[in-house]
Amino acid sequence: MSFVRFLLLALFIPTYNSLSSRSSTPRRLNFFSLTSPSPLLSTPSTETYFHELSSTTFSSSIGSPTDAISSLYPCTYRTFNISSHILTVRQTTHSLGKLGSSIWSSSLSLSSYLPLEPSLIKNKKVIELGCGLGLPSIIASKLGADMVLVTDFWGEEGDRGMPGGMFRECIEGNFRGNGGKGEVFMLDWHDESVTLPFQPTVVIGSDLIYYPSDIIPLIETIKRIDAAEVLLFLPLSKRREGLEEFRRKVKEENTWLVDEEELVFNTHRIGRERMLKLMITQKK
């Protein structure tokens, strides 16, 4: 192997080194983050890969499509190849709101992981909680989900995230624009009276413990959905005050089986991210 090829492999191939609670032998999953697919690299069927093909930013005054969001804020269109699925997602600046305006590393991690577990998604009715820009929902749809319910909460004042109408418009544009099959739906975890459009069998979500006040409402929401399987990706690298309390309370639920696995996600752009993969199934 030439020196240049060696550098490419050493510098630009991110890896997941996971330490499973069930095994002393770490799994190693390769996620290629090159600007274009490399013919030098083989991709076994047991692995997946991710790379960002392009990222283009338009100011609010030139170049971007005319709608409420792009007329007011700079927008970035990011094109990804995730396990051979090509998709483009629009994000905007954080000035539009704290949440839902950009793709977080936990969302990328979950989206890159889902192709490793296609049976979890294929022909299932899936709900994503706290979808943000909807990247995992898009991947779930591309993996053959029967229907995907893409959910988040948006208020009129945009106290937590971008203003409500813009938030929904951004999610709809990303999901529909990438051929998503399903529905975008506002779900308030604090509202126990909400009725979902259909009964999901699988729940997915990433970085959901942003506010400690959401811990109990989130757990109660998962219980009300009553899905057979729940897959959550929660960052360990970032400071999330309520994470340990959430883990403890989830394990206290008598009807749930909880499996945890730590994953280390390394990329040359994001850096080192420790993720907790938390899987909840119903006790039989």
Image (spheres, rainbow, N blue to C red):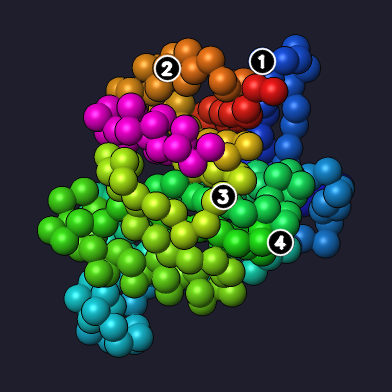
State the residue position of label 2.
Answer: 249
Q: Please name the residue shown 51% across and 76% down the image.
A: 177
The residues bearing labels 4 and 1 have C-alpha atoms spaced at a distance of 29 Å
Q: Between disc 2 and disc 4, whose residue precedes?
A: 4
State the residue position of label 1.
Answer: 21
Q: Between disc 4 and disc 1, whose residue precedes?
A: 1
Label 1 near label 3: C-beta < 8 Å?
no
Q: Quadrant of the C terminus?
A: top right
Label 1 near label 4: C-beta < 8 Å?
no
Q: Position of residue 95 (x, y in %)?
A: 19, 59
Label 3's element? Answer: loop
State the residue position of label 4.
Answer: 144
**Amino acid on which disc 3 is placed:** Pro
**Amino acid on which disc 4 is placed:** Gly
State the residue position of label 3.
Answer: 200
The residues bearing labels 1 and 2 have C-alpha atoms spaced at a distance of 18 Å
Which segment is the magenta one? 207-226
Q: Between disc 3 and disc 2, whose residue precedes?
A: 3
Q: Is residue 222 magenta?
A: yes
